[in-house]
Image (tube, rainbow, N blue to C red):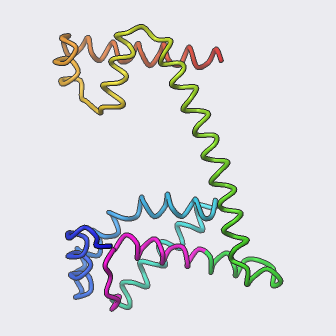
Amino acid sequence: MNDNPADISLWNAFKLGDRDAFDNLFRRYYPMLILYGVRLCPDKDIVDDCIQDLFIELWQSKATTEVQSVKAYFLKALKYKIFRRLRNKLPAQTSNNTEELIVLSHDQFLITREDELHTAKKIISAINELPGRQKEIIYLRIYQDLNYDEISEVMNINYQVARNLFYQSIKSLRQIMNKE
């Protein structure tokens, strides 16, 4: 499991004391670590504290660990930090059972995933009720991530018409969603 060569390069530079490489690793991985962490623990403050602790400890120790995947290393280290933090907050009789934590976080993940799927189905259903050009512009803008210049070229309309059409499409989509 080899990681992105740029990440390995940053990791090696960080190990040699390069502050910019360390900052770059933090900026690159922080959003992903937050998303992963809240799947394990719904308390975002605890997750954020654990991420901060992880990076502080890494900087202080200059992480002598050789890694093949920076991403995997960060995910695993964060997981253990969160479990240790939660275990310390639990009553003594459950403090050694991290499987309970996994089950709780897994249940939370399933509930969140079910809510997301339900919302996605509602949005897709509402989009299908839109007229053709409105469906097309939503597809181009949101799903293909095209900017208005690109959309105007694809749809053969001018820039301002593309902006107006997208605005109207979103407004219509909201109206449809509010009816349900």
Q: Is residue 149 left or right of residue 77?
A: left
Placement of the C terminus among the 4 image quadrants: top right
Outermost right residue: 93
* Residue 112 against residue 80 in the figure, above or below: above
* Residue 39 against residue 179 in the figure, above or below: below
What residue do we see at 54% from left, 71% from top?
Answer: 49
Measured from the top left, where is residue 62 in percent x and y?
A: 33, 89
Outermost front residue: 1
Quarter where residue 156 is shown: top left
Placement of the N terminus among the 4 image quadrants: bottom left
* Residue 162 against residue 28 in the figure, above or below: above
The main secondary structure of the magenta stretch is helix
Foreground residue among 103 and 39: 103
Q: Is residue 26 magenta?
A: no
Chain part drawn in magenta? 63-82
Q: Is residue 29 left or right of residue 101?
A: left
What residue do we see at 36% from left, 84% from top?
Answer: 59
What residue do we see at 32% from left, 13% from top?
Answer: 164
Q: Is residue 71 magenta?
A: yes
What residue do we see at 58% from left, 40% from top?
Answer: 116
Q: Is residue 8 left or right of residue 171?
A: left
Measured from the top left, where is residue 19 in percent x and y?
A: 25, 79
Foreground residue among 163 and 80: 80
Measured from the top left, where is residue 56 in percent x and y?
A: 42, 81
Quarter where residue 106 is shown: bottom right
* Residue 173 against residue 71 in the figure, above or below: above
Quarter where residue 30 is shown: bottom left
Total marks in image:
0
Measured from the top left, where is residue 13 in percent x and y?
A: 21, 81
